Image: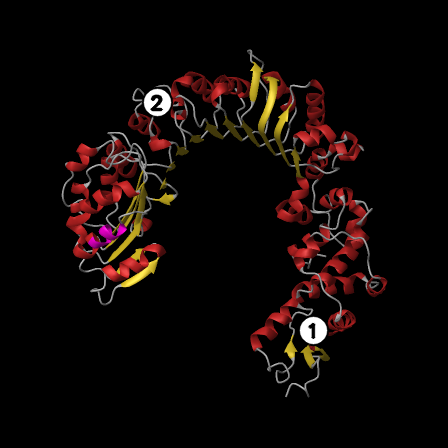
Amino acid sequence: MEGLPIEVLTEIFSHFDDESMWNAMKVCKIWTEVFTTSTKLNERFQLQITKEFIETQDLSNLPNIPIKNISIIDVNIEEASNFKKLSELINTYKHSIKNFSMTDVHFTSIENLKEILKDQSSLKNLKISNLNFFKSKPIQRIFLPQLQSLSIKITNNYVNSMKNIFDLFTSNESIEKIELTAQACNSNCFDHESFNNFVKTLPKFKHLIMNGHGILSYLNHKEFPSKLEKFEVFALGFHWRASVPRLDFLKSQTGSLRELKLHRLPFDTDGGEVLKFIIEEMNLENFYYDEIPLILNEQKQEIEEIWVSEASVNALMEILRQFPMIKILRLTLIGCSIGALHLTEILSLPTNLFNQLQELIIIDNSRHEFQNFVNLYKNCKNIKRLTIETKESKLSELLKEFLPIMTQLEEFKLVCDDFDINKRLEVISENCLSLKVLKIKKEHLENARRIFNDFNDLIFEII
Amino acid sequence: MDIDRPSDPQVSVVSSDGTMFHTTLKSILLSGTIKDMIEHIGEGGVENMGAIPLQNVDSKTLEIVIKWIEHHKDNIQPTSEEIKDKTADFIDPWDENFLEMDLDKLYNLITAANYLNIPQLLWLSTRKIAMLIKNRTPQEIRSLFNIEDDWTPQEIEAVQKENQWCEEK
């Protein structure tokens, strides 16, 4: 049997019923490992509890196997019979559950949550999403000896739930990682004090993930008691209340922090300063912007493209200054972004800033009327490839803005519907004298061929 | 000259210990591994290609495999995807009888079916072993397969605890 490869053992084990599986798990360590590492077999150790499951499942007929992953989805346990059934069921697997996730579960009070989780001796990862508590009062704490990671997501209407959950898990010293998500919350709903008091009781806590706009107000650098090793921010612009300056928070974490992930570039006025500090002063091992590693020296040279949607102009400048190898800039304009908020800054940019760029991609979906980008574009002296994706109403004006750089363009991609497309194409043909490739929509091809009749070697590509 | 070409040409395979076996193309194509090899040779090359060397299958095992594929050459074979969802409802009595062999032979057959990628044979042979394990205690399984018990008492206690509920039942 030793000679058999893992995949063959997996094949054999997949024929087992629950009981044989359980007996086989106790044979030797290799066999146990096969059970825990194979995805195919692992499915057997999972249990998904839905409304239907709770209503129909016979509790005397549960899988006779140590369930490791349990997820409860969309169950209303305000009803006493449902609640009783659920807690009995969970209690059955109290020594084997390692990963526990609850989504859209309606509780009458946080006491219920405590009841469900009590005596879970193996639980490592707990994820709580959109729990609704209708009553909340001060409660006793719960103690889960193996708990390492706690993830809490709340909806707008139940902002107090977060504080209740903090109180519930206070002093669970094994917690290392916390993820907080509050998508649409008003930042004023939170008080950082309860979070600070909570993490103060967690000596091993070192990894913080924050998702959603407003959630960052949970951080107060002045009192934040933990030294983080990993910090991930998936919130708009790495931005939080002016009364909690990011720079000061980052300074307080310098030395301990090894990894920082930002989903967006900072977009308020000190964005450039913040980025400069992160890159030059924090001595990070890993710094990611939108999953792109930005700090490792050897990789720094390889970064050629950057995608910016929300950022302040000085943050963008700082990125280009730090990473001279970036040749492709993709700007996505939505609402309050470059140009819209920071027009005056763009107009005063140093003229050599965009010399390094060879390709510019503008995706303008903003509701704003077109802003004056002329200074930005006339500085892009070396741009050879240009993409414009915009609404019809803006195209004419955008093309006008681009006139100063059009003469050097070799490739033009136009993604736009315009009643007056012929006129627009004429502007391009009159100005882009070096054009070699034109990428347009299929329905515009015929007109384009006629208008660009004089361009001998021009290649048309359909997009 | 397709007319003269036998509908199921002969193919030779050589075992790891150098024994040559003759079988037919239809039979050998039940092996996904050999099918891939032959597809790379291309049409028309089959008659002229030499014996296919199978370095991971010894002659005793290869003989058994050939017996199985020749018996099943005209049957439609389930793909590995279909086999995943297969439940053990009906087993062909011929197969049941065919799989009556000692454990060593069965291991070798499983290994060969895995290497040669014959999903149905792999399913049958692994199922056979699984049936042997069924309803046995861990200790019985260990002695049946000569497996060393490498758990410390503390470790096995922790494992037992995980499923206290199943144990008590």
Tell me the residue that label 2 is attached to: A221
Can I make out residue A410 in this image?
Answer: yes
Residue A423 is one of the magenta-drawn residues: yes
Name the secondary structure under disc 1.
helix
Residue B158: x %, y % from top left: 69, 35
Residue kind at label 2, given as amino acid type: His
The residues colored magenta run A421-426
- Compared to residue A296, the image places residue B10 above or below, namely below
Circle 2 or circle 1, nearest the eye: 1
Q: Is residue A450 left or right of residue A120?
A: left
Whether residue A155 sits left or right of residue B26 in the image: it is left
Give the residue number, with chain letter if any, for mark 1.
Answer: B28
- Label 1 amino acid? Ile
The location of residue A9, given as percent across then percent down, is 69, 54
Dominant secondary structure, magenta? helix
Say how many tags the image has.
Answer: 2
Chain under disc 1: B
Label 2 secondary element:
loop
Residue name at image x 54 percent, y 31 percent: A148
- For image coordinates 69% across by 69% down, the residue present is B30
Q: Which chain does the numbered disc 2 sit on?
A: A
Q: CA distance from mark 2 to mark 1?
A: 71 Å
Write down the quadrant of residue A74 in the picture.
top right
Q: In the drawing, does residue B30 fall left or right of residue A350?
A: right
**In front here: A189 or B121?**
A189
Left or right, B75 with reference to B81: right
x then y, percent, for residue B143? 80, 52
Q: Residue furthest front?
A: A419
